Image: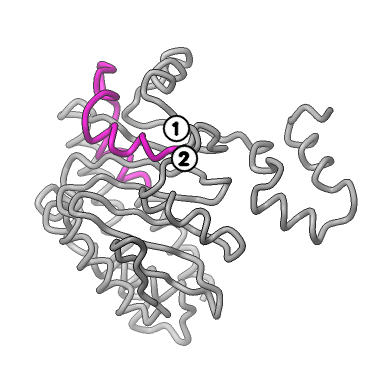
């Protein structure tokens, strides 16, 4: 139903806002050198075309106030989603996923609840691109507790989930129809998730899982310099370089080049602000 779709979108937006608020805006930069921040950052390619990250804490008073405020707002949405589900008719797989996520978060949007989920009160995360494909790495308090929560959410949603293993590291694959699409893995302290397309899956899965480093990583000094130049805190920041999504040889570029009219990729690059030689 259209109303459920609107609520689902709002729920997803508030979830991101809650995560950003929980990690907040830090007053001083040394946090980029902190172990948890470094553990996330070393997996981010230097050529990522986008980055949304939180690598430091906010001042406690600000963090507690914003978590409480956004948690209350999100709880209202979760309650509405659960009530809507009770009277809704046919649900899409996405509807079921949002509802099962809402049920897992219900009543756990405060400090003790985040601890119980395994997220903890000081997560560090980065959403970035591996050859333009989205990847998420989150440093949490208890990865195994969060793993149990995510497994329950996927089971309750009735999604098609397969399991695999690479070099001894287990992972899950969530399919969209018959297409393996979303890859998820856990360690004791991390959640890793990313979308991989079949043509590049074998090459990029080791990078997503952290078994193989990117060709070049976004280093803490380089990132600190970028943030300082723009006056941005490492606690919550992001950027997008649209033209970089069309880098030669990357999956999106290859798909467009294979199926789009001649000159389409170059025209898109120019429209997105890239210099076309």
Where is residue 56? Give x, y as percent.
26, 29
Tell me: 168 left or right of 240: left
Where is residue 127? Give x, y as percent.
43, 44
Chain part drawn in magenta: 16-44
Q: Decide: few, some or many residues near mark 1? Use Cα within 10 Å; few <14, some 14-19, many ≥20.
A: some
Residue in the picture at 81% in, 30% down:
276
Tell which residue pokes out farthest to the top in this image. Answer: 229
Q: Decide: few, some or many residues near mark 2? Use Cα within 10 Å; few <14, some 14-19, many ≥20.
A: many
Where is residue 218? Give x, y as percent.
44, 29
Tell me: 168 left or right of 201: left
| Front-lying residue, 56 or 216 | 216
Q: Secondary structure at mark 1?
A: loop
Residue in the picture at 26% in, 23% down:
33
| Front-lying residue, 160 or 79 | 160
Whether the magenta-drawn stretch holds residue 38 is answered as yes
Where is residue 229? Give x, y as percent.
47, 12
| Label 2 with label 1: CB-CB less than 8 Å | yes
Tell which residue pokes out farthest to the left in this image. Answer: 112
Which quarter of the figure has residue 87? Answer: bottom left
Tell which residue pokes out farthest to the front in this image. Answer: 167
Residue 64 higher or lower than 169, as above or below: above
Residue in the picture at 33% in, 74% down:
154
Disc 2: which residue: 214
Tell me: 202 left or right of 162: right
Q: Secondary structure at mark 2?
A: loop
Q: Quadrant of the C terminus?
A: top right
| Front-lying residue, 61 or 150 | 150
Which quarter of the figure has residue 185? Answer: bottom left
Disc 1: which residue: 217
| Way the structure is coloured | one colour
Whether the magenta-drawn stretch holds residue 246 is answered as no
Residue 151 higher or lower than 132, as above or below: below
């Amino acid at each position: 139903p259209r109303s459920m779709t609107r609520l689902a979108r709002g729920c997803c937006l508030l979830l991101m806002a809650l995560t950003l608020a929980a990690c907040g805006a830090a007053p001083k930069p040394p946090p980029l050198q902190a172990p948890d921040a470094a553990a996330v950052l070393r997996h981010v390619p230097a050529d990522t075309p986008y980055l949304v990250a939180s690598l430091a804490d906010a001042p406690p008073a600000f963090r507690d106030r914003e978590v409480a405020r956004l948690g209350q707002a999100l709880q209202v949405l979760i309650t509405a989603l659960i009530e809507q589900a009770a009277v809704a008719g046919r649900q899409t797989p996405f509807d079921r996923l949002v509802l099962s996520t809402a049920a897992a978060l219900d009543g756990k949007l405060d400090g003790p609840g985040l601890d119980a989920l395994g997220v903890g009160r000081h997560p560090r995360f980065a959403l970035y691109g591996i050859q333009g494909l989205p990847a998420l790495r989150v440093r949490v308090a208890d990865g195994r507790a969060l793993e149990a929560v995510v497994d329950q959410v996927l089971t309750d949603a009735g999604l098609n989930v397969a399991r695999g293993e690479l070099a001894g590291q287990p992972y899950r694959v969530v399919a969209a129809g018959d297409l393996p699409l979303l890859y998820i893995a856990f360690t004791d302290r991390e959640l890793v998730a990313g979308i991989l397309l079949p043509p590049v899956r074998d090459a990029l899965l080791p990078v997503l899982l952290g078994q193989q480093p990117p060709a070049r990583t976004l280093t803490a000094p380089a990132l600190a310099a970028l943030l300082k130049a723009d006056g941005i805190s490492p606690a919550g920041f992001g950027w997008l370089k649209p033209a970089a999504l069309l880098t030669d040889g990357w999956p999106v570029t290859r798909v467009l080049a294979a199926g789009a009219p001649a000159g389409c990729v170059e025209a898109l690059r120019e429209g997105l602000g890239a210099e076309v030689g």
